Amino acid sequence: MSSDKEKLEEFLHMNKSIKYIRLQWIDYSGVLRARFVPIARCLRIASGSETTCLAQNSMIIPISTAPRLFPISDYHEIWILRPDWSSLRRCGFKSGHAAAMSFVDQKDAKIRFDKCPRMLLVKALERLENEWEAKVVLGFEIEFVLMDMLNNVIKPIDRLNGYSRTAGLRAGTLDLVEEIVDALEQSSINIHHFHAEVQDQLEIALTPEPALQAVDSLVLAQEAIRAICVRRNLKATMTPKPILFGPSSGLHLHLSLNKLGRASADNFLAGVLNHMGSLCAFGMANYDGYVRSTSDATGVWIGFGTDNRDLPVRKIGDQHWEFRMMDSTANPYLFAAAVLLAALDGLGKKTKLVWKDCKFFPHLMDERSRVEFGMDKSMPVTFKEALDCLKSDAAVKTWIAEDLLKWFISVKDKEVEEFGKMTDEQRRLRFLEYF
């Protein structure tokens, strides 16, 4: 196995134009952060002669209070970035730049990396492979809206005007999307397709990849979309509620399994559905995300159905599902890890799949019919409700390190408190700054 320095040197040998490497991580608020580091120093970091230290607020600052902080503990930890040099990619949207996702370590910690969402995903994947000889591939559907410098939706003559219509993709917007796709390809990210979603909304679906690599691709793809649009004096926003009256944006996770039998696949899915309320706190990790707890978005009732977009889980194949209870405010490593850990809980406990495959519109079903399909519990309709589900879910506390869970919940409790004091427009503008 190559050393960190050898991985970096090999990458630089193949990419001689690189001058800076972005050492990236995502905080508990779902915000991408980075240090832009010259190559010479990167080589010293990779050889182990230097480290990159972070301020504690690099993980725990709520966007509702930023730049103000609030105390979580009276102990000032030293946080260290540990780049995963195997994740190196060119930044196809900026010449001379590359990016590496990083683990977050703590000096003098009792358990190394116990507060790192990316490491949590790595451990969940290892458990799935070691305990069940199974692997997963993930793919993401990125929904976004284009806005002008005044935070209004752009309204060109050729306006996006409906699901998979060619309207809106005949002129300048098509040129923009093609530029984005070209940049993604230069970043070693392939797309499945792109299309108009609903009015004023675009979707770019990424090609499925092994789980960790897929999340890394998602992070870089989102940054590419934003960066290219900014150069055109546009804002590509992925926030769930970009305008007060208009489309809501999600970030749907496709997951495919291999090597699990039918019964085990049912247990896998049952584990996810059994912990749906808690998973919403990780996947829709913001005050306004629950505008999507409606039909044709995340869904109103907990359940699944073949090709049913009115439920939080859309079944696509026997071991392929789309998890719709996610948006761009999630830390994608934390959410993907939580989904897998819930599924592992179902596998370990042989949780029975009491839900039936629902191919009907749930809002047109009466209560008796819904109960027959196992849909007797509704989705959380507020972030506070989802957090309450998480706090009362004893099983989650056995999957996720105590401090990571405590700090995540502390940040999100503060978000509920502070955002609850704001008007809808104030919250909208704050989310537009970050997502």
Image (cartoon, rainbow, N blue to C red):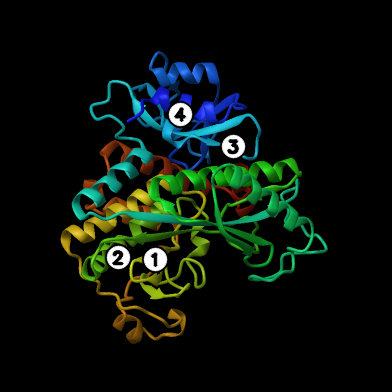
Position of 252 compared to 143: left or right? Answer: left
Query: Which numbered disc flags the more N-terminal residue, 1 or 2?
Result: 2
- Name the residue located 65 percent from the left edge and 40 percent from the top edge: 93
Q: Residue 143's spot in the image, x, y percent?
A: 58, 58
Residue type at numbered disc 1: Trp
Q: Residue furthest right?
A: 157
Residue on which disc 1 sits: 321
Name the front one of labels 4 and 1: 1
Q: How far apart are marks 3 and 4 (CA)?
A: 26 Å
**SS at circle 1:** strand
Query: Which numbered disc flags the more N-terminal residue, 4 or 2?
Result: 4
Q: How far apart are marks 3 and 2 (CA)?
A: 36 Å
**SS at circle 3:** loop
Residue on which disc 3 sits: 91
Position of 393 compared to 312: left or right? Answer: left
Q: Are marks 1 and 2 in contact (CB under 8 Å)?
A: yes
Q: Residue 21's spot in the image, x, y percent?
A: 54, 27
- Name the residue located 26 percent from the left edge and 45 percent from the top edge: 126
Residue type at numbered disc 3: Cys
Residue type at numbered disc 2: Leu
Q: Distance between the residues labelled 1 and 2?
A: 9 Å
Residue on which disc 4 sits: 57
Query: Which numbered disc flags the more N-terminal residue, 3 or 2?
Result: 3
Q: Which residue lies furthest to the top in this view?
A: 49
Q: Distance between the residues labelled 4 and 2?
A: 36 Å
Q: Do the residues labelled 3 and 1 touch (CB within 8 Å)?
A: no
Residue on which disc 2 sits: 269
